[in-house]
Amino acid sequence: MSISIRSLNKIYPNGNHALKDINMEIPTGMFGLLGPNGAGKSTLMRILVALMEPTSGEVEVFGYNLLKQRKEVRSILGYLPQDFRFFAKYKTYEFLDYAARLSGMNHSKQRRQAVDEMLESVGLFDARERYANRLSGGMKRRLGIAQALIHNPKLIIVDEPTTGLDPEERIRFRNILAEISKKDVSIILSTHIVGDISSTCNCMALMNTGELAFYGAPQDMLKETEGKVWRIKIKSNELPIIDKKYPVITTIPSGTGWEVQVVADEIDGYDAEPYPPNLEHAYVYYMEKKLNRWVNG
């Protein structure tokens, strides 16, 4: 395992217990960290990138003790925060060159080659002369991952990387991460978008109110939803009733009524047929039945 987290706690001065006795192992490859807002994902990310100290517990990153060897951990770390910013005065290639120099890449010829290769790999070589702050949202995300990768880190942490991206850019970004994960590196993808996890990650964790609610393969979480997803055809005036009674995943107009997908152990009073579950169904079912976090209506 590349990262070992043992008995990790974080209590803020205001008394908020943001992380509660987190224990897990993170392997190489793509690892998904899923959970709603306020689950504790951002706090865990800040601890892992050595921007925050935990209240108690231990973290080992590729053999380094995070609390005692912060400099060594940072040297093998690449980080793309959710609110990543660019300096307005830099062109795309200049910004990446700046990031390479910050990472310790001092030989100019080697740095130029690394910058060009990285821009090519993230599909930004043709935009190398464009000012970084004038790139599209998706291109900015790709430049962000380029700066996180320029020094060949062993651990890459990306926080909500596809929020606000259109479907094409979201797929492109996920494909870039998937290609990187084939190397001997660990990529932690923190997100609230279930599709990002199901498309790329072989191992995942679900966090809720600072606790580790699920750890394992997405398929294992999916198994818990088998036989729990239903398709129901209802009249238009019945939709508010269904919405209050069950977690509704999708609603599709059908003639004079609706075809809805819901998650529930069983359906009462309606003609329902089982529907094959996906990870989004599993997430909603888990939050509803296991964690009592679903709010109807």
Image (cartoon, rainbow, N blue to C red):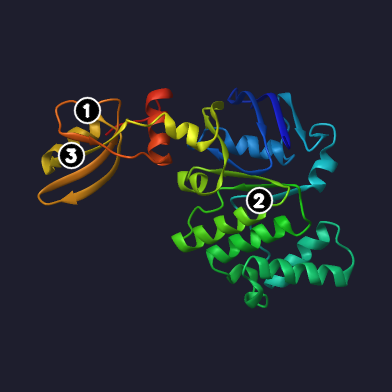
Q: Where does residue 92 sit, x and y in percent of width and height? A: 68, 71
Marking on residue 22: none
Residue 153 visible (yes or no)? yes
Q: Give the labeled residue for mark 1.
A: 267
Q: Where does residue 171 sit, x and y in percent of width and height? A: 50, 58
What residue is at 63 percent from the left and 50 percent from the top?
81
Residue 90 visible (yes or no)? no
Q: For label 1, count other residues whose C-alpha is less than 10 Å away and answer few (under 14), some (14-19) or many (20+).
A: some
What residue is at 76 percent from the left and 51 percent from the top?
153
Q: Is residue 152 above or below residue 10?
A: below
- Look at the image and tell me in which quarter the C terminus lies: top left
Viewer-proximal residue among 64 and 240: 64
- Look at the image and tell me in which quarter the N terminus lies: top right
Q: Secondary structure at mark 3?
A: helix
Q: Secondary structure at mark 1?
A: loop
Q: Give the labeled residue for mark 3.
A: 239
Marking on residue 181: 2
Instruction: Inspect the image, locate mark 3, and give the three-letter code of the amino acid beneath it.
Output: Leu
Instruction: Inspect the image, locate mark 2, and give the three-letter code of the amino acid beneath it.
Output: Ser
Q: Where does residue 110 sit, x and y in percent of width and height? A: 85, 68
